């Protein structure tokens, strides 16, 4: 990962704790991340929030693997992952490619597939 885009969030792992009248997410042995009064969906919210660092790390790994050619992701998936990572890290979100550029990229990928004998 590019060090200029490192997240400024508290590193995980985070854990969710739900008490009688509260929910909280904290770093194990570290600071409190969030605290809220119990509602019907509190347990689910706490679990989801606690997994946020893991989700962000996974999205960043998928993009790194795509750029190294180790995993296939279509252009729309790449753009969506880039936008998710940008929102989570506060980085500038990438612009959506134009329809002409998207069509060109698809044509190139299809031609490369035919050249290597792969089905596109």
Image (cartoon, helix red, strand yellow):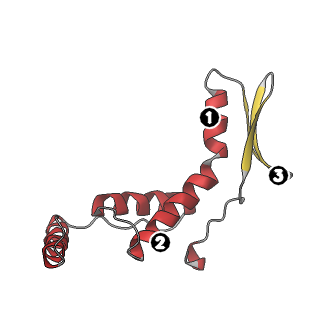
Q: Position of residue 13 (x, y in %)?
A: 72, 53
Q: State the residue in front, 40 or 57.
A: 57
Residue 117's disc number: none
User: Mark 1: few, some, or many residues within 10 Å (few <14, many ≥20)?
Assistant: some
Residue 45's disc number: 1
Instruction: Tell me the residue at 40%/75% (across/down).
Output: 67
- Ranked by sequence position, the earlier of labels 2 and 1 is 1
Q: Does the residue at mark 3 contact the one at mark 2 (Cβ under 8 Å)?
A: no
Instruction: Tell me the residue at 71%/60% (across/down).
Output: 11
Q: For the N terminus, which image quadrant?
A: bottom right
- Ranked by sequence position, the earlier of labels 3 and 2 is 3
Q: Position of residue 63 (x, y in %)?
A: 44, 67
Q: CA distance from mark 2 to mark 1?
A: 29 Å
Location of residue 14 with respect to 1 vertically, above or below? above
Task: Mark 2 vs mark 1: give the one in front.
Answer: 2
Q: Position of residue 30 (x, y in %)?
A: 84, 53
Residue 71 falls in image quadrant: bottom left
Location of residue 19 with respect to 110 vertically, above or below? above
For label 3, the SS is loop
Q: Describe residue 117's horizontal placement relative to residue 68 as left or right.
A: left
Please name the residue that numbered disc 3 is placed on: 31
For label 2, the SS is helix
Q: Position of residue 22 (x, y in %)?
A: 77, 28
Work out which residue is located at the far front of the displayed protein and give it.
Answer: 117
Residue 12 falls in image quadrant: bottom right
Residue 6 falls in image quadrant: bottom right
Q: Describe residue 58's horizontal placement relative to residue 10 as left or right.
A: left
Residue 64's disc number: 2
Q: CA distance from mark 1 to mark 3?
A: 18 Å
Q: State the residue in front, 16 or 117.
A: 117
- Ranked by sequence position, the earlier of labels 1 and 3 is 3
For label 1, the SS is helix
């Amino acid at each position: 990962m590019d060090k200029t885009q490192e997240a400024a969030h508290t590193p995980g792992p985070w854990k969710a704790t739900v008490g009688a009248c509260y929910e909280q997410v904290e770093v194990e042995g570290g600071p409190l991340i969030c605290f809220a009064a119990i509602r019907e969906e509190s347990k689910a919210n706490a679990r989801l929030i606690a997994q946020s660092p893991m989700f962000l790390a996974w999205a960043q790994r998928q993009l790194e693997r795509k750029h190294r050619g180790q995993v296939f992701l279509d252009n729309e998936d790449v753009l969506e992952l880039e936008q998710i990572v940008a929102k989570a890290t506060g980085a500038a979100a990438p612009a959506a490619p134009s329809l002409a550029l998207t069509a060109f990229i698809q044509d190139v990928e299809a031609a490369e597939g035919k050249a290597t004998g792969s089905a596109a």
